Image: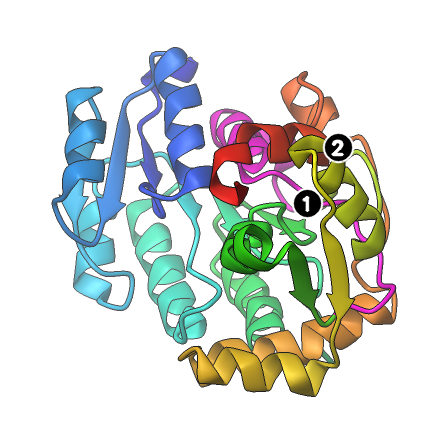
Amino acid sequence: MEKQLKILVTGATGKSGGVAIEELLKMGIPVRALVHSVDERSEKLAAQGVEIFVGDLLRFDDIAAAMAGIDTAYFCFPILTPGVLQATAYFAQAAKEAGLKGIVNMSQVSARRDAKSNAAQDHWVGERILDMSGVPVTHLRPTFFDDWFLYIREDIREKDTIVLPFSNGRWAPVDSADLGRVVARILTHPAAYAGQTIRLYGPEEYNVFEMSEVLSKVLGRKISYDPVSIQSFNELAAARGAHPHFIQHVTHVAQDCIDGVFAGTNNTIEDITGQKATTLAAFFTDKKAVFQ
């Protein structure tokens, strides 16, 4: 039954989408990848037997065409890019027209009606749009990813410092490869998870002072945490050319983190995939070279 499915993966050249595709191919399931352009990453997918469809999530005709002959789909819109509501509405309508059996929607743990982050509130509204489509949908709400440390790797590499505006806020980082495995499992068993909103946490909760200790141990040198104010971090991000959409989002999710919105842990990744979630130490060990 599973091998009769055909699955569409967006964000296919990203980490979660890429791992989802790897898992689906292991199961022998045909995969179509929606990509922005043909490049080395998409060519690698094509060499693995993935059908490549070039299109844009902000063009309805592209999404509708990509959905033709598809059974289930992963919707992953980049959080740092404006336009998630437009893309979600297009995706929902195209999925309804195509008669999809299920959608896995990438949301975030801070998604809620009264979120102050535009991106977080848009994700909540996007969930409601998908719910109204009538297509069975599963919303995934992960906490912060461990991959966020890659965005500040230059400070870690050159200054032995983690500069973030999260004060003593705590969370259990999720590895996006684990997210990809969760996505693959749900895409192949859509009825089992339909209608659910699933929070995803890593296996261990920390504040950034404790995370810096984990990284120090892995690298064998002292890494310090500089808990700058939200305003100072935003000024630094703006100076480095960050998009105002990103700055507005970070402003409010940083406060959410300080207020405990991102805190918590669970075994959901292991329960769904049968594989233990990646620890922060394992992530740092795997990415050790980029911090050296």
Tell which circle, 2 or 1, labels the residue nearer the N-terminal end.
1
**Coordinates of residue 200 in the picture (x, y in percent):** 71, 43
Picture disc at residue 196: 1
Does dot 2 land on a helix, a strand or a loop? helix
Mark drawn on residue 127: none
Q: Name the residue carrying label 2.
A: 268
Q: Residues in magenta?
A: 166-195
Would you say residue 242 sits in the magenta stretch? no
Q: Residue at x 74, y 76 (%)?
A: 228
> In the image, what residue type sits under mark 1?
Gln
Whole-percent x, y for residue 268 in the image: 75, 32
Residue 218 in picture, x, y percent from top left? 69, 32
Disc 2, disc 1: CB below 8 Å? Answer: no
Residue 91's place in the image compared with 233, above or below, is above
Q: Is residue 192 magenta?
A: yes
Crowdedness near tag 1: few (<14), some (14–19) or many (≥20) residues, C-alpha within 10 Å: few
Number of residue marks: 2
* Other-residue count near label 2 (Cα within 10 Å), few / some / many at <14 / 14–19 / ≥20: some
Amino acid bearing label 2: Thr
User: Can residue 108 be seen at all in this image of the molecule?
Assistant: yes
* Dot 1: element: loop
Residue 57: x %, y % from top left: 29, 61
Q: Quadrant of residue 207?
A: bottom right
Name the quadrant containing residue 2: top left
Residue at 61% across, 33% down: 283
